Image: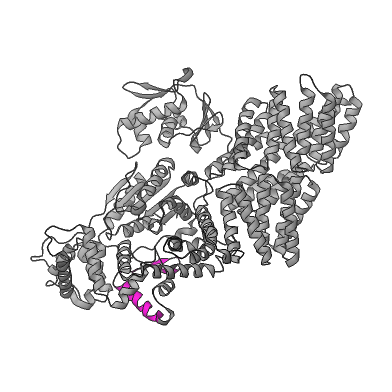
Amino acid sequence: MGESDNLRANDVASFGPFRLVAAERLLEKADEPLPVGGRALDILIALVERAGEVVSRNELISRVWPDVIVEEANLRVHVAGLRKALGDGHDGARYVANVPGRGYCFVAPVTRSASRRSVPPVQPVRTERLHKLPARLTRMVGREDTIRALSAQLMTRRFVSIVGPGGMGKTTVAISIAHTLIDDFEGAVFFVDLGALTDPALVPTAVASALGFMVQAQDPFLSLLAFLGERRVLLLLDSCEHVIDAAAALAEPVVSEAPQAHILATSREALRVEGEHVHLLYPLDCPLDDIGLTATEALTYPAVQLFMERAAAGGNRFDLNDSDAPIVGRICRRLDGIALAIELAASRVSSHGIRGTAELLDNRFKLLWQGRRTALPRHQTLNAMLDWSYNLLRERDRLVLCRLSAFVGVFTLKAALTVAGTEANDAEVADAVASLVAKSLISPTAIGESTYYRLLDTTQAYAAEKLAECGEVDNSARRHAVYYSNYLGHDDVIQSTFGEHDLSGYAPHIGNVRAALEWAFSDHGDITVGVELAASAAPLFVGLSLLDECRNWCERALAAIDDAGRGTRREMILQEALALSSMFTKGNSDEVRAAIERALALAETFEDRDRQLRLLSGLNIFFTRIGDFRGSLSVAEQGVAVVGAVKNPAGLVMTDWMLGVSHHLVGDQAAAQRHCERGMAKAVELGQFNVNCFGYDHRIRALVTLARVLWLRGFSEQALGIAQQAIDEAERRNHPVSVCISLIYAGTVFLWRGDLGRAAESIDRLIAYAGRYSLAPYRAVGTALKGELAVIRDQAGAGLILLRSALEALHAERHDILVTIFAGALAEGLRKTGQFDEALITINRALAQAASRGATFDMAELLRIKGQILGTMPQPDRPSAVECLMQSLALAGEQSALAWELRSATALARLLSEDGQRDQARDTLAPVYDRFTEGFETADLRIARCLIRDLA
């Protein structure tokens, strides 16, 4: 197949009602995405590339399942699913034909065109998080070939699971593979410690957090898949066994739907999903026979090499000799070649020598296994090894080891000192930790520039059982929870403004924070500690984009607060975090407003001006989203009073921008321009070019508002420049919400100017980008804009379908900021299709909604649309039409909206001209036209100019 036959990266293939954009792996029907499985889509792309030709089954299998052996039945199943999705065979439609004995052929006519989409490029996952990948051992023993083979297999097959019992070295091998492949993935290698999770439902958000993106949808799986898209990444999912179902449910769609994502998993059992390639990690090779075994021969076996290296690391200064070689061989064989067990035994050599270690081992096993005649499973062997090692510890070290079982994942030495001891015996606990490290019961690891410690899963489980036997579980859990509450609560970076700092460096602590919260809110926990910890941890959950978890713990903490806890700073923090996390996970609900207003009342009580301003900005955003523009203006004015009381220069920038947005929406465009431009000037003076608050970049918000205001005031060319600046800045910052906002509101400027090509490009980018990041409200806005564009292009039938579906989605989300303007576009489309009664009902409903908000920026435009409907009905009501247009003209003048004046004047002049009042028509339109100083080649000015000439 020649290269010319392939769908080029920007090609769109059209057939029947479908459009296939191969580069985006997108199939649309009637301009709406059609859900199709990844394999079925691969088959469709392959067939459409060679439409009219027979593609053999073998070719399709090799294309869709590269390097994987599958049966033809798999192909038949996916072809059947594809036919069903396309409606093949219904109403005479035929797309995919089976050619017996040969293969399949795409038989429908296909037209190809260059896509006008220009989706913001997929950003590579940044390497700032690379230091979160645990360090690999400087030398691996006996696993070099395995690492090479699995590295190669992972690159070709994409999904490999390393499976074996505890203590076998699965994580160590996986981390080494990850480091080996760092360059192949340009640093996009991410370690996800699933062992730190206590709830399987948190698996997708844990992966999202490791990747560094915020899940902002009800279904985190869809968000994750959308984010991954075409990104080339390697995910290392470590310790899947206790969340096996959730890990499997995540891995399968990632592998099938994200073609550049690779997964390396470690688990004690296979995930058993499609695409998984299981590698059983076997024990290290041991000598099979002790008789005549020399030191040289013994050291050819990896198990013996590991034993001697770890013995040397523990202080042994003697080389292996021929007399001890059989003993070491027997020790390794007795331990079944399990790496952890060998390391534990080797740590005793410096104290007891090789022969003494073997004797202790033999005696201990004899005691454990007395009366048993069959070989024990490896897991029991490891438990026996841990039991033996534990009994050799000093009492102090035993107690510290047991108390450290409260930790999940990694912990610092400071945390260990707090949980396992008291200030009076810090030195003893530190010595105990060092001793336990030397005995391989605790593993040190470097993350970034810090040293952390962890108990391997098997060791942690064993120590937890011993702690339970001592009756100290709750006491240690309490100390653990109190430590993390104090640590998080007193860290200035974590407790700073939400979103002000990158908190990814604190990600290693999240497993312990979760575990502490789970204990605190359990039946045997401490609610008081839980409430305090939830408040301290809320900024961390937000900073790591774990919004669902933040909302859950805030709700539980607030429900548990007693009378003494109400009205405290702690409640204020919880309410703020609840509002922020809920706005993105549950939409614009009454609960969000209640949380913001409660936190705001508390901030006022405590005279916490900075928090007041943050909360006011959140309330301002909330009111704009639900369409309460008067409410948003009132809140912005409250912000001015707060800033004035403390003389906060940065706050002045934010309040000016809040006022600019609010004045624009209520229809005072002169005030809106003044505040937006004044805020921009102050930001330059302060060197503060953006303000992030409540998930929004307020500079981008102000820029798109300024662009719209400039167009409304008649400065079309300036508006175009600012609109493009907003898009460029948002894309440079790579913040999904800001990119969508810039594309939405810059897109309206393009539409208003009549720059329909640029508008179409912006709208397509918005829909694709919002879909990629699962931002449902913004995708619905994109669909509505696409419908409005279709109406303008006289494709009213298609436009009505898009507008109706989008308005339904926006109402469901309570995302009402633009619903009246979209309702106006719907009414215009109904007028163009001759549905005048419904058009009049629709525009009256939109006007009533706008009037209920007070004045709005689009009221004049809605009145113009109503006037045109009344004037063009089969039985026109021309007096009422003229009255509507006169009202529109007057209101646009009051709002300093020269662009709306021009539209209304043009419509009124046309109506007057048709009634024979040509002079009055010219006198109505010409003065408005003459007030423009730029933008004379935009659509509205061209139309007005032509009409004025006709009236001359």
Q: Which residues are magenta?
A: 425-451
- Between residues 576 and 331, which one lies in front from this camera angle? 576
Q: Is residue 411 above or below residue 261?
A: below
Q: Is residue 40 above or below residue 201?
A: above
Which quadrant would residue 844 be assigned to in this image? top right
Looking at the image, residue 475 sits to the left or right of residue 786; the answer is left
Q: Residue furthest bottom?
A: 424
Looking at the image, residue 440 sits to the left or right of residue 232; the answer is left
Q: Is residue 821 above or below residue 839?
A: below
Which quadrant would residue 837 be assigned to in this image? top right
The tally of labels here is 0
In percent of width and height, residue 397 lies at 31, 75
- Image quadrant where one finds the C terminus: top right
Q: Residue at x 44, y 50 (%)?
A: 204
Please tell me whether residue 429 belongs to the stretch shown in magenta: yes
Q: Is residue 895 visible?
A: yes
Q: Residue at x 32, y 67 (%)?
A: 468
Q: Is residue 635 above or below residue 710?
A: below
- Between residues 391 and 590, which one lies in front from this camera angle? 590
Please tell me whether residue 830 belongs to the stretch shown in magenta: no
Looking at the image, residue 479 sits to the left or right of residue 723; the answer is left
In percent of width and height, residue 819 lies at 67, 38
- Between residues 507 and 637, which one lies in front from this camera angle? 637
In percent of width and height, residue 5 lies at 45, 29
In percent of width and height, residue 435 lies at 32, 76
Q: Residue furthest top?
A: 92
Q: Is residue 2 visible?
A: no
